Image (tube, rainbow, N blue to C red):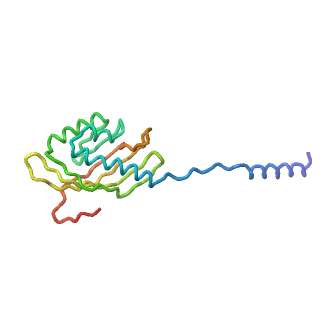
Amino acid sequence: MSISRIAQLTVFAALAAACAQQPVTPPPPDEGAIRAGISARLAKFGPAMAAKDAAGVASLFTEDGTWILPDASTFTGRNNIEAGAKNFFTTMETLVPGETAIDKLIVVSDAEAVTFSHGDYTQTEKGKSPVKHMNPFADLWKKSTDGTWLIAYEVNADGPVPASAAMKP
C-alpha cells in the first residue's frame, strides 16, 4: 500500500470519527423539583410529631434509615425509629410545630440529596411549662422507587431558644 493511500485512509478514518455522534451529556438534576419534593416530605414531619404519630414519623425514613436525636439517641430502621418516637411521645404532653425551612440543598444526583434545615416548635413536657425550641438538622435524602423522597440519615441539634436570641430563618 502506498503512503498516499495510507494517508487517504487515515484522513477518512479521522473524518468518520469526527462526524460520529458524540455521547449526549444528560441534563443536570432539576434542583427545583428536588427541593419541592423534599419540602413536601419535610412538611409532614411537624404534624406527625404533633399528632404523636410514631408510624407517620417512621414512614418518612428509608427502611434502613437512621434518626439521631439531640441527646445522641440513635435509631436505625423504621421499626426502631417508630419505637424511639413512641418513647419520646411518652414524655411529651403537646408539640406545636412552627416553620420548617431548608437552609441549604446539595443535589448529589437525581436520586440523592443532602439538606441542612431548621425548624421551630413549642413543646410541653408532662408537668412542665411550654418551651420554644429551635432545631437545626441535617438530612441525607434518597428518592424511593415511587418517586417520593425519604430520609436515609438525620441528625438533630435541637435545644431551647434562649430568651435573648432572635429567631433567624
Quarter assignment of residue 51: top left
Residue at image location 27% in from the left, 64% down from the top: 168
Quarter assignment of residue 99: bottom left
Picture layout, residue 98 above or below residue 54 = below
Q: Quadrant of the N terminus?
A: top right
Which residue is more in the foreground, 60 or 88?
60
Residue 87, percent from left and from top: 19, 38
Residue at image location 28% in from the left, 47% down from the top: 45
Residue at image location 73% in from the left, 49% down from the top: 20
Residue 62, percent from left and from top: 36, 39
Query: Residue extending furthest left?
Result: 127
Which residue is more in the foreground, 136 or 58?
58
Residue at image location 57% in from the left, 50% down from the top: 26
Q: Quadrant of the C terminus?
A: bottom left
Which residue is more in the foreground, 127 or 72?
127
Residue 90, percent from left and from top: 15, 40
Is residue 166 found left or right of 151 in the rendered image? Answer: left
Query: Residue extending furthest top?
Result: 79
